[in-house]
Amino acid sequence: MDPGVYRVVVFNAARDGNLRRLRIFLEDRSHEWLHHCISSQELQTPPLVIAARNGHLDVVKYLLEKGADISATGTVIFDGEIVPRAPVLWVAAAAGHIDVVQYLVEEAGADINQTTQSNSSPLRGACYDGHYDI
């Protein structure tokens, strides 16, 4: 199967929170293969970013366990606005997924000062969308 097809399947599984499908496609793969599917710079939005955006904590944990880059960024849409180079922590905070934010900061070592292309911090992203508890 074309590697690009695998990337699409992995991205869709991460987006949808389908941990079972991710395991099927990512278990027992080489480091290079995993990098190609979950951390490649060819990806406009890595699976880790979209999983955090959609609040799929179990998928976020699994992707990090498989070697996804905690400092990865991607293009996401919030309130109809395209946000380029949004970090994993920023998308989780802006979407109000406090459990994902807490895990990323306390256990995964996410950089709380990593900003989007427009210099928006995770705290600003959370407050802008009314997620003051973050």
Image: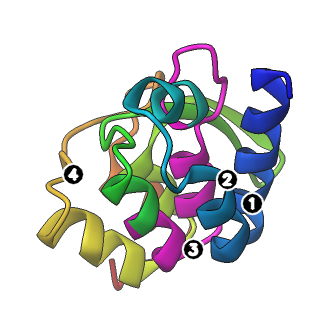
- Label 3 or label 1, whichever comes before in sequence order: 1
Q: Does residue 114 lie above or below 26 as drawn?
A: above
Does 106 sit left or right of 61 as displayed?
left
- What amino acid does circle 1 point to? Ala
Amino acid on which disc 3 is placed:
Gly
Which of the pair 47/92 is nearer the observer?
A: 47
Answer few, some or many: residues within 10 Å of disc 3's Cα (few below 14, many 20 plus, some between 14 and 19): many
Q: Amino acid at mark 2?
A: Phe
Going from N to C along the chain, the mark reached first, 1 or 4, is 1
- Asked if residue 31 can be seen in this view, the reply is yes
For the magenta stretch, what is the residue range?
38-61
Circle 2 packing at 10 Å, graded few (<14), some (14-19), many (20+), is: some
Residue 8 image offset from top left, x and y in percent: 81, 38
Furthest-front residue in this view: 28
CA gap between label 3 and label 4 equals 16 Å
Q: Earlier in the sequence, mark 4 or mark 2?
A: 2
Residue 82 part of the magenta segment: no
Splitting the image into 4 quarters, where does residue 102 fall? Answer: bottom left
Q: Quadrant of residue 116?
A: top left
| Residue receiving disc 1 | 13
Q: Residue drawn at (53%, 37%), measured in percent from left and top?
A: 38
Q: Are marks 3 and 1 in contact (CB under 8 Å)?
A: no
Report if the CB atoms under discs 1 and 4 are less than 8 Å apart: no
**Residue 129 on image: x %, y %:** 57, 66
> Which residue position holds label 3?
55
Q: Residue at image x 46%, y 54%?
A: 125
User: Would residue 127 be found to the left or right of residue 108 on screen?
Assistant: right
Q: CA distance from mark 4 to mark 2?
A: 26 Å
What amino acid type should be assigned to the residue bearing mark 4? Ala
